[in-house]
Image (tube, rainbow, N blue to C red):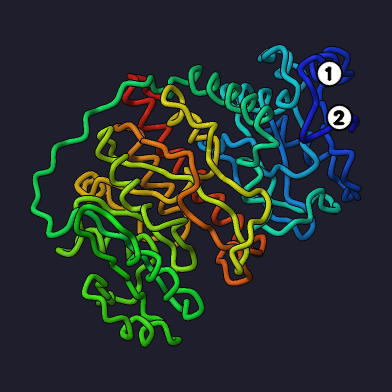
Amino acid sequence: MNLVFPPGPSSADLLSLIASAEGDILFIGDPRVTIEPGPRMYERLAGTLAETGAGWVYSDAVGSPRIDYQAGSIRDTFDFGPVVAVPVRAAREVGLQEGLKWGALYDLRLRLSERFPVVRIPEPLYAATRADSRASGQVLFDYVDPRNRDYQTEMETIATRHLERIGALLPPVFEPVPPGQGSFSVSASVIIPVRNREKTILDAVESALSQKAPFPFNVIVVDNHSTDRTPELLRSVSDARLVHLVPGRKDLGIGGCWDLAVSSLHCGRYAVQMDSDDLYAGEHVLARIVAELQAGPYAMVVGSYTMVDFSLKEIPPGLIDHREWSRENGRNNALRVNGFGAPRAFDTEVLRRVGFPNVSYGEDYAVALRVSRDFEIGRIYESVYLCRRWEGNSDSALPIETQNRYDWYKDWLRTVEITARKARNGVSR
């Protein structure tokens, strides 16, 4: 194994390696990782290639289970581990996009996946050190770090061409947002699902209630059966604009709590997100977001946020503004990345039509993907939100089994969305 994987190599390097490869199989490895092959690692990889007709084979490692590849696994961050096997003939057959500095292997993998299976061997064929030992909460924001923008632009180009080749690319043509038909008691609702956030919930509620807007609004907190002092703290707030809902059932995730709030009679014409440990960046944020929703009019608007610690001191990477988003290609590139940004705000009638899945991770991504299939999404590029990172964040340090489950779910969402977009374009498979 003599090839950088990832983050390189260039197109020229990879094409040269494929052209000069001896034998039928190219084993690709990561030189940053020390690999201890199991007794039959190479035989299992080679045999699986031959028996399945795969174009790309990878496996689990000792202590590092991985997930199966799907049609929606098109993100460039998919974890194959430091060892993969590729048939040389197939690699030569599919070719490569020229001029790539970082994404040649990503391009090769997508091209191979269009014609051949991508197969995981659910066996620990080797032991390896980790190339990236950071916690999940740190890795989470790499793709929006402005220092990585050139890299991300190249990856977007590769993914876009893949979607075009498989018939899943959508042009920048959008359905009009339907005019409001319902009767709403307020113009906007800030929605805060919460469970056991006694340390932060009052900060979030006070930030929402302190908004100054030229329209009536309320704050809907869905208290998902907290067992700490969260209910007591919420009852201590005397502002009549605070709506404290407790679900009648105990099997709701964050998405189910959102559905409860949005479907209630209390929900306003627009529904605006706030997490129970975050804050708005000022007192005019709600007015700014609603104005943007109306200006489109948009079915959804996504703002920008600043990463801060618990004392509100800015921490790297600082501003997360998703400037990779474009009207022309944003909803296509959204299939490559793992999120849309925050805070998110919705036209309530569109949101009621789409609905949230009853899960506690990826529920916002699921809704945003579905909305983006039909409607244009507006963006606010200045910071309107403070995202507090602390040890209490639900994604601060996930065990690998949980991270795998979350990644698999988002890949599944993309698989469904790609299938639907292909059907919209008249592509049957």
The quarter of the picture where residue 248 lies is bottom left
At horizontal 88% and vertical 14% (from top left) the residue drawn is 20
Q: Quadrant of the N terminus?
A: top right
Question: Residue beneath label 2, please?
Answer: 3
Q: Quick check: 274 left or right of 325?
A: left
Q: Please name the residue shown 76% across and 60% down the image.
A: 63
Task: Residue 359: tell me if it is visible.
Answer: yes
Depth check, front residue: 243 or 252? 243
- In the displayed structure, 419 sits above or below 247; it is above
Q: Secondary structure at mark 2?
A: loop
**Mark 1 packing: few (<14 Cα in 10 Å), some, or many (20+)?**
some
Please provide percent x and percent y for residue 131: 82, 48
Viewer-proximal residue, 121 or 298?
Answer: 298
Q: Is residue 23 above or below residue 354?
A: above
| Marks 2 & 1, CB-CB < 8 Å contact | yes
Q: Name the residue type under label 2.
A: Leu
Please tell me whether residue 273 is drawn above or below residue 295 in the rendered image: below
Q: Amino acid at mark 1?
A: Asp
Q: Residue at x 28, y 32 (%)?
A: 296
Q: Label 2: few (<14), some or many (≥20) within 10 Å? A: some
Quarter assignment of residue 393: bottom right
Q: Could you tell me if residue 55 is visible in this image? A: no
Cα–Cα span, label 2 and label 1: 9 Å
Residue 288: where, in percent of width, then height? Answer: 34, 46
Q: Residue at x 56, y 52 (%)?
A: 306
Q: Which mark sits nearer the N-terminus, 2 or 1?
A: 2
Q: Quadrant of residue 53?
A: top right
Q: Is residue 12 left or right of residue 163?
A: right
**Residue under pointer 1:** 13
